[in-house]
Amino acid sequence: MSQLASLPTAPVAPVRETPRAVRLAWMALVLVIPLAWGYVAVLRQPSDGTVVYASSSAGIGDRWSQEAGVVVFGAVGDSPLARIIDEATSHDRQVRVYAVDGEPLSSGGDGPHREIGDSLTYSVTVDGHEIEPVHVTLARYPFASLAATNPGAIAFWLGLVVAGCFVYWRRPRDTAARAFLALGLVVPVGMTAYPAGLQVIDFASDDGPWTYVVGDIANCFAWATMLLLSLEFPKPVSAFARRRWLRVLPFVVPFVLYAARYGLLESRSDDPLTRLEGQILPSATSAVVVTPLVALVLFVRARQPDQTRENKLAIRVVLTSVLVTGLLFVVLGQLPQLVDGLPQVALWLQPIALFISLVGVAAAMLRYRIYELDVIVRRSLLLEVALIVVGVAFLGVAWLLNRLGIATDRAQVVVGGLVAVSLIPLGHWVRQRLNRWFFGARDDSYQVVSQLRGVGSSVSIEDALTDALTRLTRTLRLVYAAIEVDGRDGNEDIAVSVGEPDRPATMVELEHHGQPWGRLSLGVSRGREPFGPRDRRLLDDVASQLGALVASLVMNRDLRRSRERIISAREEERRRIRRDLHDGLGPALAGQSMQLQFARELLRTDPEQVDAVLERMNGEVRDAIAEIRRLVDDLRPKVLDQLGLVSALRQHAAGASFSRAGEGDGAGLMRWSVSAGDVEPLPAAVEVAAYRIVLEGVNNAAKHSAASHCQVDLQRVDGTLRITVADNGRGLPHEVRTGVGLGSMRERAEELGGTFDLVSTRRGTTITIHLPLTLS
């Protein structure tokens, strides 16, 4: 073993840091290449002010054809043709251009060379009706007008570049960070396909649609980069880690999808323009297929057991970003285009919402406040599902209305508004159901509290609390719930739980009228959102309801036990009286009866002995009378009826002293005195209890505290009789504080619904008792 330990070990190669110059160079390329491409592909080309997009539904409809021409989606600049297009599209009218200078549009770059300043004549139809030929003068591309009509796309590009550069600067050797930076390069290049798009002049010149094709190929690389990012983040999949060349596979997927789509379209139409529309849009299928594929990959990776919790949270953030993208581009963009040829949401609005994706992905890669983002992610996922349901429902209704021929502008506005308003309750209902399924009734504290109000208080504390916890776990989708009730007045603590925790539980104090009663612990599963600040009101309401429930259960238990003690004490008192009558007074009276019979016989036989027998009987009668008085005094001291409570105690204090603890043979006596306010008259039960409590308290002070004086004070306070027994001794030892004497004092107080409090220090002991003057 020592020989093995002495063998030299190979040094671990340190991770090389990417030089700052290299990082700056890559970041500069990400900014410079898109700008250079924009100049070559857009600004240097002559422009006729038209914007033409290839439809993802090409091959199914007839958007482009040599006979009908191409559909003009919009216009940039302020030419006469642009004004005609803007006027028509604002009223949802379809504008087509089918010829330039009398020549039909072609599918490739086989037209004449065009220059800035050339004057051309366009043949145009609006909703199938031909209008007067429009004269167009080619000019430099109006980039400022394009940027003004598509602010979202420009802002998204700049945001993507800034976020990609920032993440790459912080993590330059991370493949996922490099992929994120690459998105800042390919996405702006792809903007020559959208939002710049094609122009009609591209179908009537020698340039052709090559810039559009290159831009959409860049979009294919963008989708492939997203797929690579999902496989590399937060750490590469095992296959990629072992074989680096497999990282090429995600870039093959978009082109395989394009090849499949191209083969399908090739068999659908013989029109060259129709085929061209399908051929120059390679990314159309990727936009529909890659987005759910990326979401599926992230979903599977987030559930892998070898992922750390931090990695899982980061993947969830990226997953949310992907779903937002899918919601915007697929559900509200691509899908409506497949159905009706137009997106349901303006295209320039879509990139604005992608800032959420940028922030989420950047924060996930840098692990910035990832645990707080996890809560936002969970809620966002449910909101997205609700939006998808409402969006699909709206698309279905819009498609149905379109089929029914409701096409006038006023009818579309009215019907669209009514449909949108009618779908608001559907969205609210879907969101409520999803929240209830995943998070329970956290947003409805009234329902949670209502469930707890049905817990019965007539059963045992354990059964009632188990019922309450079961209702909580069912209502709030918990895996664990527990209640700890503090023991009081010598009672043991109570602990009840349901389920098993798999993460640290949230603890809430249970209080009722400002008095603590215990603690509530709630645990959710690892796959669900933990309780946070936004749940404080819910937790407070639950704690308040459970605090009242616990207080009610404990007081009911104490009341039942008090009643049991009262009944037991009454039965014991009856048993004692019966025993005393049976064993004492009964035999004495029977003996006197026998002696009376004997005296009658002596009167006939020996009259002189009768007097002695009667004398003995007289003594036994006096003893019987004393025994009766003792029994009566045990039921209620006679002195209370004669003098009242205060005077009886003062008489007792004046005529009785007690030997102090530790002072044998009366060498040291404890004196005691009574002070009182205007406390009488008192209820009989209160008077007897107070009399016996005071005597027991004074007796305890004399026996155990070594006090020289004990002061008793009686006062009326807030509808109660306050009894204070205070001595100047050395305090009571622990075994005395829980002994029989103090226990009987406490029981007498609680039998009447009163309270008992004891404070013992080295300077003396004070007992304070409150007895209610109104007994129920």
Image (cartoon, grey):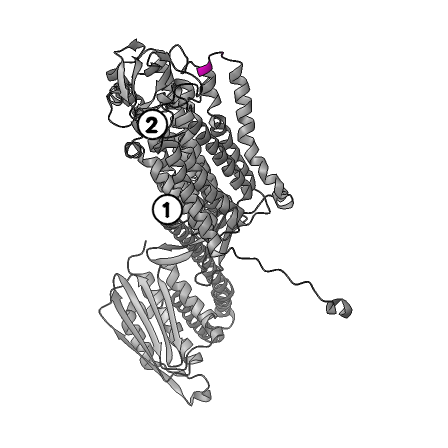
According to the picture, the residue beneath numbered tag 2 turns out to be 46
User: In this rendering, which labeled residue sits more in front, label 2 or label 1?
Assistant: 2
Depth check: give the residue in front, 84 or 463. 84
According to the picture, the residue beneath numbered tag 1 turns out to be 538
Depth check: give the residue in front, 579 or 567. 567
Q: Which residues are magenta?
A: 268-273
Mark number displayed over residue 412: none
Residue 731, by quadrant, is: bottom left
Q: Is residue 258 visible?
A: yes
Query: At which x and y percent is residue 601?
Result: 51, 67
Depth check: give the residue in front, 518 or 98. 98
Q: Is residue 473 visible?
A: no
Q: Secondary structure at mark 2?
A: strand
Query: At which x and y percent is residue 640?
Result: 31, 68
- The three-letter amino acid code for the residue at tag 2 is Pro
Q: Secondary structure at mark 1?
A: helix
Q: Residues within 10 Å of mark 2 (few under 14, many from 20)?
A: many
